[in-house]
Image (cartoon, rainbow, N blue to C red):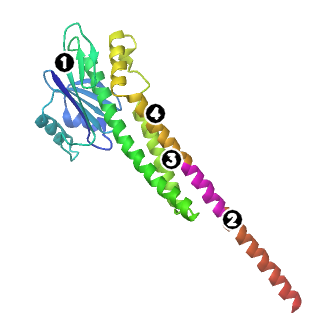
Amino acid sequence: MYSVIALQVAKSLNIRRCKQQLALPICYSDSDELFLSNGSKKYLYLFQYGVIAFFNHTPSEINTILAALEIGTSYSVDADLLETITVEIKAGAQQVTFDRVILPDFEEEALRLVLLNTSQSVALDRYLEITDGLLEETNIYTQSLETTGRLNISGKNLKKFIGRVLNIKNQISENLYIFDSPEVTWENESLNKLNVALKQTFDLKDRYRYIYERTAIIKEDLELFKDIMDHRESSKLEWIIIALILLEVVDLFVFRLF
């Protein structure tokens, strides 16, 4: 039996820099992912969104790799953003349960799928934490609006908040291709079944929808805040115009009187 450990090690990883720092045999690579071999039956999978998945590595080996990457973190079994699953090789069998994946043989592409889906589960946990924080922050303003009738945020800070929400939404869409299947599964029925089973086990699609719906709620609230802010600024402008007109009328009246 082999252990798979995926953990969030940073907000993001520079894949090109990771190649240089680790200098291990490359099994697969693109601008966002790096799948490496680290000796006999040992693999690691690095993702641009800051997650690394380790196959058949001890805690000491994991920490050695993290030290080589110079990201200032170390492995801990108590880490919040961490996912584990066990892989068992059993001839003629392929099955995925909540804590174990059984594979018929030691196939590299099958292992890559296991590491990919485990990593995406960790990334979803991180984005859920972020969206929960954004929603809590949004609720502060909605509660203030309910109790005081005022929006307790400046126009500049509101724009920054909207930008932060949109950036998170874009990151989720760009980094997590939950609804897409890797090319390797397109013409391989066994790998496709494995990929589908892994997504179902980690509940990736429903968790992705949940996060996306929460970001949509936050975005809708912020658009309402912006409308209120625009109306407030418009009202200020109207009062300034009225004041200027009154000033002009008074000035004209005084001029004619004297």
Q: Which mark is residue 88?
A: 1
Specify the segment rendered in magenta.
221-233
Crowding around mark 2 (Cα neighbors within 10 Å: few <14, some 14 to 19, many 20+) is few
The vertical placement of 74 against 173, above or below, is below
**Mark toward the start of the polypeptide (3 vs 1):** 1
Q: Which mark is residue 209?
A: 4
**Residue type at numbered disc 4:** Arg
Q: Mark 4 touching mark 2, by CB under 8 A? A: no
Residue 44: x and y in percent read: 22, 29
* Residue closest to the eye, 232 or 255: 232
Q: Which residue occupies the extreme top position in the image?
A: 92
Which residue is labeled 3 in the image? 218
- Give the foreground label among 2 and 3: 3
Residue 21: x and y in percent read: 21, 37
Q: Which residue corresponds to the image point at 20% horizontal and 42% vertical from the top-left?
A: 78
- Residue 188 shows in the view: no
3D distance between C-alphas at marks 2 and 3:
26 Å
Q: Secondary structure at mark 3?
A: helix
Residue 59: x and y in percent read: 13, 36
**Mark toward the start of the polypeptide (3 vs 4):** 4
